[in-house]
Image: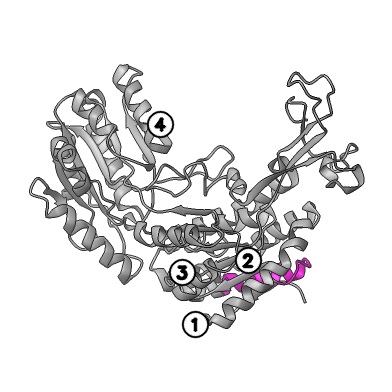
Amino acid sequence: MTGSAIEPMGDTTIEGVEAVVARAAAAAARWASLDLADRAAVLRGIADRLDAYGPELVALAMAETGLAAPRLTGELRRTSFQLRLFAGVVLDRGFLDLRIDPPDPQWPMGAPRPDLRRMNVPLGPVLNFAASNFPFAFSVAGGDTASALAAGCPVIVKASPGHPRLSRRVGDLIGETVEQFGAPTGTFGLLFGRAAGVRALTHPAVAAAAFTGSTAGGRALYDIACGRPVPIPFFGELGSINPVFVTAEAAYGRAAEIAAGLLAAVSASAGQLCTKPGMVVIPLDAPIFDEIIELARNRPMPTGPMLNEDIAATFTDAVDRIRSHPDVRVLTGGGPGEALVLATTARAVLVGPDALLHEMFGPATLLVGYRDTDELLELARTVGGQLTVSVFADRAVDTARALIAAATAAAGRVLWNGWPVGVSVTHAQQHGGPYPATTAPAATSVGSAAVSRFLRPVVYQEVPEELLPPELRSDNPSGAPRSIDGARPR
């Protein structure tokens, strides 16, 4: 038997979890050793199937999430694109990071250097906790699944409760594809229910986990992963306010442009994006305040519905927490289907950062007025770990340089005169950041570098040629790029 292991929809039983994980464990060695061209073919095949069933999948997603067809169509296109991107990564073979140091009897360490041959190998079965706000790109066939499969790891997805029928259908399509291409039983599995996800996370055969969601939920799962008898890597994306810092020159010179961009970024997808700008820092008397009020009155930007009741309730609680602060006022919005813009001062944030530096996952943002450059820079150095930090400035002056330095210390992606809501899927992308944005700041969940999360290096010392992986043998039959004695891969 080949293909995937998918339990019937409805919370997966303990016995079901054990069976799915056991099949993934049994598949691990065969999937890891599959010819890389065949591995890439599976990834491309999944992308082709998703595209072929696109209208059906978009209709299912609309029914379960309330998201609009154009948004979902674009997201599905992104999902199939990143599957093909990872297929290309597999075929390139650079992700193996092949390094060879030939023996050297004159090595300056004082002892001969042995023959050392190093490469990355798959970790083993990966558990992916699917997100609710991206029903395609961060869900069953999303980036975590694609990158783990590309690394050579079987994948078990714990489906999001926000779109179970869509998850089932996408899981079926993946299962049909891996079976068509002869992948081993257990290459892909799907679980439903919170208890099933926790049970799988504690299973000794699961080698790593990925998560996108709330700070509370992600931290709880991270603690479980770290508390196992054998801890495992847990790549969690937890939460981010994605602060935006606007210099005085930009604030006065481009007030209308910045105000319009902010309202568009906060309204998009009802603010249910992990990169939504949740705090915008501007001069206290900047015209942006008035521009936002005017735009909201004359050109309102509909936000659309919340994804589900749980997200709506969490958003309401977060807004109430910020709004109840004595130094916070409502600038505009907050009615049905419109973005809420709150306002406070930099001094209030600096006096009590824990009260105001809090993610509002939905259509709301906090404007923070600063008095002078010193206050602006002090706040920039206080925001903590973030996915993104944006800087709006007109020139590379000392203030801008200091803001870029603070942003580099705080975030995984630093933007110049741009809003962070678009995350391009490409080779140089970094979607991660210091805690609490993520649990693994050296990793990314978007872009081709995401594959490295599910690999570990092994060095073979003086191992006979015939026992080495083909990519490390002298003849290198696949032509994989390799570093020889420290020289660049070729």
Tell me the CA gap for discs 2 and 4: 37 Å
Three-letter code, disc 4: Thr
Quick check: 438 left or right of 82? left
Mark-to-mark CA distance, 4 and 1: 44 Å
User: In this rendering, is residue 60 above or below 302?
Assistant: below
Residue 331 position (above or below residue 315): above
Query: According to the image, label 3 marks what residue?
Result: 160
Of mark 2 and mark 1, the one earlier in the sequence is: 1
Crowd rating for badge 1 (residues with CA inside 10 Å; few <14, some 14–19, many 20+): few
- The magenta region covers 169-185
Coordinates of residue 413 in the picture (x, y in percent): 44, 37
- The residue at the point 72 percent across, 60 percent down is 42
Q: Earlier in the sequence, mark 2 or mark 4?
A: 2
- Identify the residue under disc 4: 408
Q: Percent x, y for residue 370? A: 16, 31
Q: Is label 4 in contact with label 1 (beta carbons under 8 Å)? A: no
Dots 2 and 1: beta carbons under 8 Å? no
Q: CA distance from mark 2 to mark 1?
A: 23 Å
Residue 205's disc number: 2
Q: Measure how far apart labels 2 and 3 are at the Cα level.
A: 22 Å
